Amino acid sequence: MRIAFFGTPEFAIPSLIALLQSEEEVTVIVTQTDKRKGRGHVSSFSPVKKFALDRGIKILQPVHINDPLFIEELSTLMPDVIVVVAYGKILPAQILRLPRLGCINVHASLLPKYRGAAPIQWAIMSGEKKTGITAMFMDEGLDTGDILLQEEAEIADDDNAETLSKRLADIGASLLLKTIKGIKGRYIQPIPQIGTPSYAPPLKKDDGRIDWPKTAIKIFNLVRAL
């Protein structure tokens, strides 16, 4: 299958590696635009872009995800499926309709819990003992699409956002390949999300402020998460 891969942070790289080592064809990588960091405002590539550059894979970095020229170029590549792993932007309907087999998102929670940008951090902050990975079909909502596969993972007492993220990234890569295989074989049936959703909004600097009157365990979870 021809795959367009959307991803930005380190979390996305194991899934990208898994696809490149499979029999599928990754025709393009879409990642967020370069950022300027530090006092010198030096341009910084995303981890996914650095990975792609080292391997000579075609890269697209639209400033605006709705850019008609970007959507036209993406459509000319005729992807059978779009895979999204922590890209960081919500895809518009024009892109969701492009691939003949749909758009698949690898999300780091057991949906419908922790929809949004920072599910790993919010799960730890909330004192959860388990989380997981969800592979889902994408729709126009915020992580509201039908579930394809899920896999649970424990959150250890000594886990922090970094250790948990690495473990979930590896689980996500494995689950993605199973999902792709199931879609090709037509033996995975998408199911609607069931249960009360919760949300994991983008982190702000104030989220890291310690409220000392809180219990020790809540402060401990905050530090682990952030």
Image: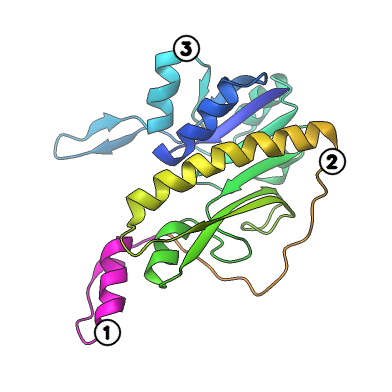
Does residue 100 appear in this view?
A: no
Does residue 220 appear in this view?
A: yes
Q: Evaluate if marks 3 and 2 touch, with contact meaning CB atoms under 8 Å apart.
A: no
Q: Nearer the viewer, residue 154 or 28?
A: 154
Task: Give me the residue at 56% from left, 71% from top.
Answer: 198
The single residue placed furthest to the bottom in the displayed view is 213
* Quarter of the figure with the C terminus: bottom left
Magenta range: 203-226
Q: CA distance from mark 2 to mark 1?
A: 48 Å
Determine the secondary structure under disc 3: loop
Residue underneath mark 1: 215
Residue underneath mark 3: 56
Q: Nearer the viewer, residue 83 or 142?
A: 83
Which amino acid type is marked by label 3? Gly
Residue 22 is covered by the magenta coloring = no
Task: Give me the residue at 53% from left, 17% from top.
Answer: 58
Q: Determine whether, in the image, residue 102 is placed left or right of residue 159.
A: right
Q: CA distance from mark 1 to mark 3?
A: 51 Å
Mark 2 nearby-residue class (10 Å; few <14, some 14–19, many ≥20): few
Q: Nearer the observer, disc 3 or disc 2?
A: 2
Residue underneath mark 2: 187
**Where does residue 221 sit, x and y in percent of width and height?**
31, 70
Specify the quadrant of the image occupied by residue 80.
top right
Which amino acid type is marked by label 1? Thr
Mark 1 nearby-residue class (10 Å; few <14, some 14–19, many ≥20): few
State which tag comes first along the sequence, 3 or 2.
Answer: 3
